[in-house]
């Protein structure tokens, strides 16, 4: 092993380990030499090897396990949203919207089929751009200079925003617990995730200060309907966070307002009037359906230019038929009324289950969003196993834990349960925590 790893600098040692992994000479789970031993073999300072191992860990190539040493990481995929495959269990961990509450686009589709769009034409449909400008400007500081971009969903927008701004190994602040797609995007991009705790009022001030002190260059935040907790920023907390960020105007703030038109809470932003790099991302997936892969992103002019450059070599533009369809639906009063009712349904369903659990001795606060975040008196994995024996598949809080230390929460998607199913789930959950 010592003879196979080479190099005399941090970058050379890290590249050597990466190359051995890629060629199959080092496999998942195999141990790397102890730092002191490898340093002696290569004739380098111990700190050089420490830095190389740290670089590899931040890139997801190795895992540091304390006294157990450093091992090649298992490239197992990060958990993702959606239905579990090949299960006979009743899945209440999907995070999906109710398909019955997604508007039917068929009536609007014939109206949006028009002249084909050719290379070199504007990449954003003019009507959608004007509507999105008004929609996003209403929730940002007055007079702020906005540019509208369109991407293939929120995850696409976040990935391109980070790639346009960051270098590999740069630090990104993430909420903890954190939305699955944000964890996945940061890890696959090779960025270094810095955990910022979330409490009942959103991202904490102390956590943000610590992240900025750690040198984060971007912050991904969910101002309302935070997934998985359902927490929304309070006005007071948002003001305190803006005050902290006033000294860091060039840190990129990415606000993911995924629940937007379904939300029951006002929008509170971290973006102050003098902040120089920001992006407010609003996808249509939660209310027009996950297959409507479109998000509008309002940014400062410089970030818009960077984002356009990232779009140029790849997708270039989102289908104008899809853009027109989204605009037609979101400006239709009857569909907007449907979305208002859908948002009320999600809120009422979560509140009903939370109240029933609280009445049975399990305190739960219903937040905003599609899901219910349930605190448990014991490890969530134990409760999940007991629920599996009763026919339920749930999502444990450990999936959303940025530090990977486990969790004592479940995230439940209950809005599409019938009354009888809801009552059975509550009974089974209470039995599972006894």
Image (cartoon, grey):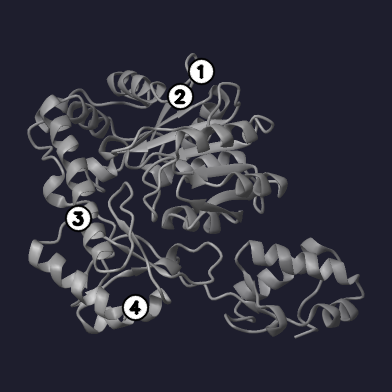
Measure the C-alpha gap from mark 1 to mark 2: 7 Å
Tags 1 and 3 touching, CB below 8 Å: no
Left or right of 129? Residue 19 is right
The residue tagged 2 is 140
Quadrant (top left, top right, bottom left, bottom right) of the N terminus: bottom right
Secondary element type, mark 3: helix
Count of numbered tags? 4
**Which is more N-terminal, label 2 or label 3?**
2
Camera-near label (4 vs 1) is 4
**Which is more N-terminal, label 3 or label 1?**
1
Secondary element type, mark 4: helix
Camera-near label (1 vs 3) is 3
**Which is more N-terminal, label 3 or label 4?**
3
**Which is more N-terminal, label 1 or label 4?**
1
The residue tagged 1 is 144
Secondary element type, mark 2: loop
Q: Which mark is residue 352?
A: 3
Measure the C-alpha gap from mark 4 to mark 3: 21 Å
The residue tagged 4 is 383
Q: Quadrant of residue 52?
A: bottom right
Q: Quadrant of residue 292?
A: top left
Q: Give above or below for 128 relative to 19.
A: above
Measure the C-alpha gap from mark 1 to mark 3: 40 Å
Tags 1 and 2 touching, CB below 8 Å: yes
Percent across and percent down for residue 418 are 9, 61
Tags 4 and 3 touching, CB below 8 Å: no
């Amino acid at each position: 092993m010592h003879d196979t790893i080479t190099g005399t600098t941090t970058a050379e040692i890290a590249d050597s380990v990466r190359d051995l992994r890629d060629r199959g000479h080092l496999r998942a789970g195999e141990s790397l030499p102890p730092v002191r031993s490898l340093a002696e073999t290569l004739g380098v300072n111990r700190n050089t090897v420490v830095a190389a191992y740290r670089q590899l860990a931040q890139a997801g190539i190795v895992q540091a396990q304390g006294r157990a040493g450093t091992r090649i990481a298992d490239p197992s995929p990060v958990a993702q949203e959606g239905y579990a495959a090949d299960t006979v269990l009743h899945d209440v961990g999907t995070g999906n919207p109710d398909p019955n509450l997604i508007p039917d686009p068929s009536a609007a589709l014939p109206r949006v089929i028009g002249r084909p769009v050719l290379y070199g034409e504007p990449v954003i449909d003019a009507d959608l751009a004007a509507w999105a400008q008004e929609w996003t400007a209403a929730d940002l500081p007055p007079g702020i200079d906005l540019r509208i971009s369109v991407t293939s969903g929120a995850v696409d927008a976040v990935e391109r925003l980070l790639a346009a701004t960051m270098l590999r190994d740069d630090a990104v602040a993430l909420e903890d617990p954190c939305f699955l797609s944000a964890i996945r995007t940061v890890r696959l991009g090779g960025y270094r995730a810095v955990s910022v705790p979330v409490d009942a009022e959103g991202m904490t001030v102390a956590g943000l200060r610590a992240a900025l002190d750690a040198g984060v260059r971007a912050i991904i935040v969910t101002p309302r309907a935070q997934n998985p907790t359902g927490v929304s920023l309070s006005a007071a907390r948002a003001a305190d966070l803006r005050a902290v960020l006033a000294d860091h105007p060039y840190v990129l703030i990415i606000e993911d307002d995924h629940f937007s038109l379904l939300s029951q809470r006002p929008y509170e932003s971290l973006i102050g009037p003098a902040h120089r790099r920001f992006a407010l991302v609003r996808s249509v997936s939660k209310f027009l359906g996950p297959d409507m892969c479109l998000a509008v992103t309002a940014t400062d002019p410089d970030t818009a230019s960077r984002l356009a450059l990232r779009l140029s070599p790849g997708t270039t533009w989102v289908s104008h038929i899809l853009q027109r369809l989204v605009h037609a639906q979101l400006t239709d009063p009857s569909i907007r009324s449907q979305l208002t009712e859908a948002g009320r349904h999600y809120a009422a369903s979560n509140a009903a289950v939370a109240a029933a659990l609280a009445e049975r001795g399990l305190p739960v606060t219903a937040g905003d969003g599609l899901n219910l975040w349930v605190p448990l008196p014991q490890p969530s994995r134990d409760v999940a196993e007991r629920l599996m024996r009763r026919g339920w598949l749930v999502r444990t809080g450990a999936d959303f834990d940025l530090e990977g230390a486990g969790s004592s929460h479940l995230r439940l998607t209950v809005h599409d349960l019938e009354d009888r199913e809801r009552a059975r789930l509550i009974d089974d959950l209470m039995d599972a925590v006894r």
